[in-house]
Amino acid sequence: MKKRKKRLGIIDGKFHPCPKSPKCVSSQSIDKKHRMEPIKYEISLEEAKSKLISIINAFKRVKLISETENYLYFEFRTIFWRFVDDVEFYFDDTKKIIHFRSSARFGFYDWEVNRSRMIKIKRSFVDT
């Protein structure tokens, strides 16, 4: 199993860029193949964090690794091979948006798993 990457976390409100490989999506990416729109919210920061944590806890094989006032970091594991995806969220409460970065830790392709997961999370956040 690959160890946790050192290129995680927020620096001056920004995630580390996605690698060139198609195994990562980010709301802060500038290129189309990795870019997704951030999640918008109109509730308080605390309510937004609580809501997001609740949505993510409904997924299987997920673990909250790190939490600060405006940052969440989770590890998602695949069922069969136990591959790990690193999923980060940054709450920009000034703009009322949640930036995210979701990336496979191992391999080159992820078969759109990270994009699909983030679509589900965004839909759940907006619909509840």
Image (spheres, helix red, strand yellow):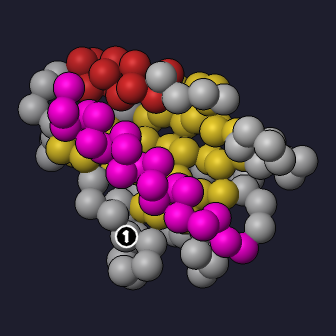
Q: Is residue 100 magenta?
A: no
- The answer to whether residue 4 is left or right of residue 75 is right
The residue drawn where x is 83% and y is 47% is 81
* View extreme (front): residue: 80
The residue drawn where x is 39% and y is 81% is 31
The residue drawn where x is 54% and y is 45% is 87
- Where residue 79 appears, as percent x and y from the top left, is 74, 39
Q: Nearer the viewer, residue 128 or 95?
A: 128
Q: Nearer the viewer, residue 30 or 58?
A: 58
* View extreme (right): residue: 1
Residue tagged 1 = 35
Against 100, residue 128 (above or below) is: above
- Where residue 13 appears, as percent x and y from the top left, is 38, 52
Q: Amino acid at mark 1?
A: Arg
- The answer to whether residue 63 is left or right of residue 91 is right
Against 4, residue 67 (above or below) is: above
Residues rendered magenta in the picture: 108-128
- The answer to whether residue 33 is left or right of residue 24 is left
Q: Quadrant of the C terminus?
A: top left
Q: How many marks?
A: 1
Specify whether residue 53 is in view: no
- The image quarter containing residue 65 is top right
The residue drawn where x is 27% and y is 53% is 38
Q: Of helix, strand and loop, which mostly describes the magenta segment?
A: helix
- Where residue 82 appears, as percent x and y from the top left, is 80, 42
- Where residue 44 appears, as percent x and y from the top left, is 17, 22
SS at mark 1?
Answer: loop
- The answer to whether residue 116 is left or right of residue 1 is left
Q: Residues within 10 Å of mark 1 (few under 14, many from 20)?
A: some
